[in-house]
Image (cartoon, helix red, strand yellow):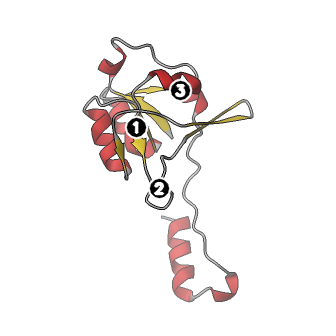
Amino acid sequence: MAVVAVPDYFVHRTAPLAPAELAQHDCIGLRLPTHGGLLPWDFAKDGREVKVRVDGQWTFNASAPILRAALAGAGMAFLPETMVLEHIAAGRLRRVLDDWCDTFDGYYAYYPSRRQSSSALKLVIDALRHP
């Protein structure tokens, strides 16, 4: 995950150095339909885990509109690294709290039981393991 905003966002604001400082920023929230509430932003550093409930004027139910809003300067976003690395490299987004964000370890496939494993499922799992 990565916390990002457009570089101009920080012209009149100090970049946060710790998750608690997000309370002083406009953050773009994610509301999942299954939970109903805002998804907290999860951070970890030196074995310490922190969940932060953020505030801001914008809340969306998917990551793509959050990215578009962040690129438009609406505030700070908490998004998967894979979505923002290209924008960071191009200078369109600036990353903050990097030392608090976990690295992406990859996707996981969960299935209910090995007893119900079909040959089709085995093919899918093999394709995911060896792209």
Labels 3, 2: front one: 2
Left or right: residue 41 versus residue 28 is: right
The mark nearer the N terminus, 3 or 2, is: 2
| Camera-side residue of 87 and 126 | 87
Seen at 44% across and 13% down, the residue is 14
Report which quarter residue 116 is drawn in.
Answer: bottom right
Seen at 47% across and 21% down, the residue is 24
Residue on which the image places disc 3:
97
Residue 85 numbered tag? 1
The residue lying furthest to the left in this view is 72
Instruction: Where is residue 56? Give x, y as percent.
Output: 39, 33
Vertical comparison of 13 with 109: above or below: above
Instruction: Where is residue 12? Give x, y as percent.
Output: 34, 11
The mark nearer the N terminus, 1 or 2, is: 2
Seen at 50% across and 47% down, the residue is 39
Cα distance between the residues tagged 1 and 2: 29 Å
Mark 1: few, some, or many residues within 10 Å (few <14, many ≥20)?
Answer: some
Vertical comparison of 61 with 130: above or below: above
Labels 1, 2: front one: 2
Residue on which the image places disc 2:
36
Left or right: residue 44 versus residue 109 is: right
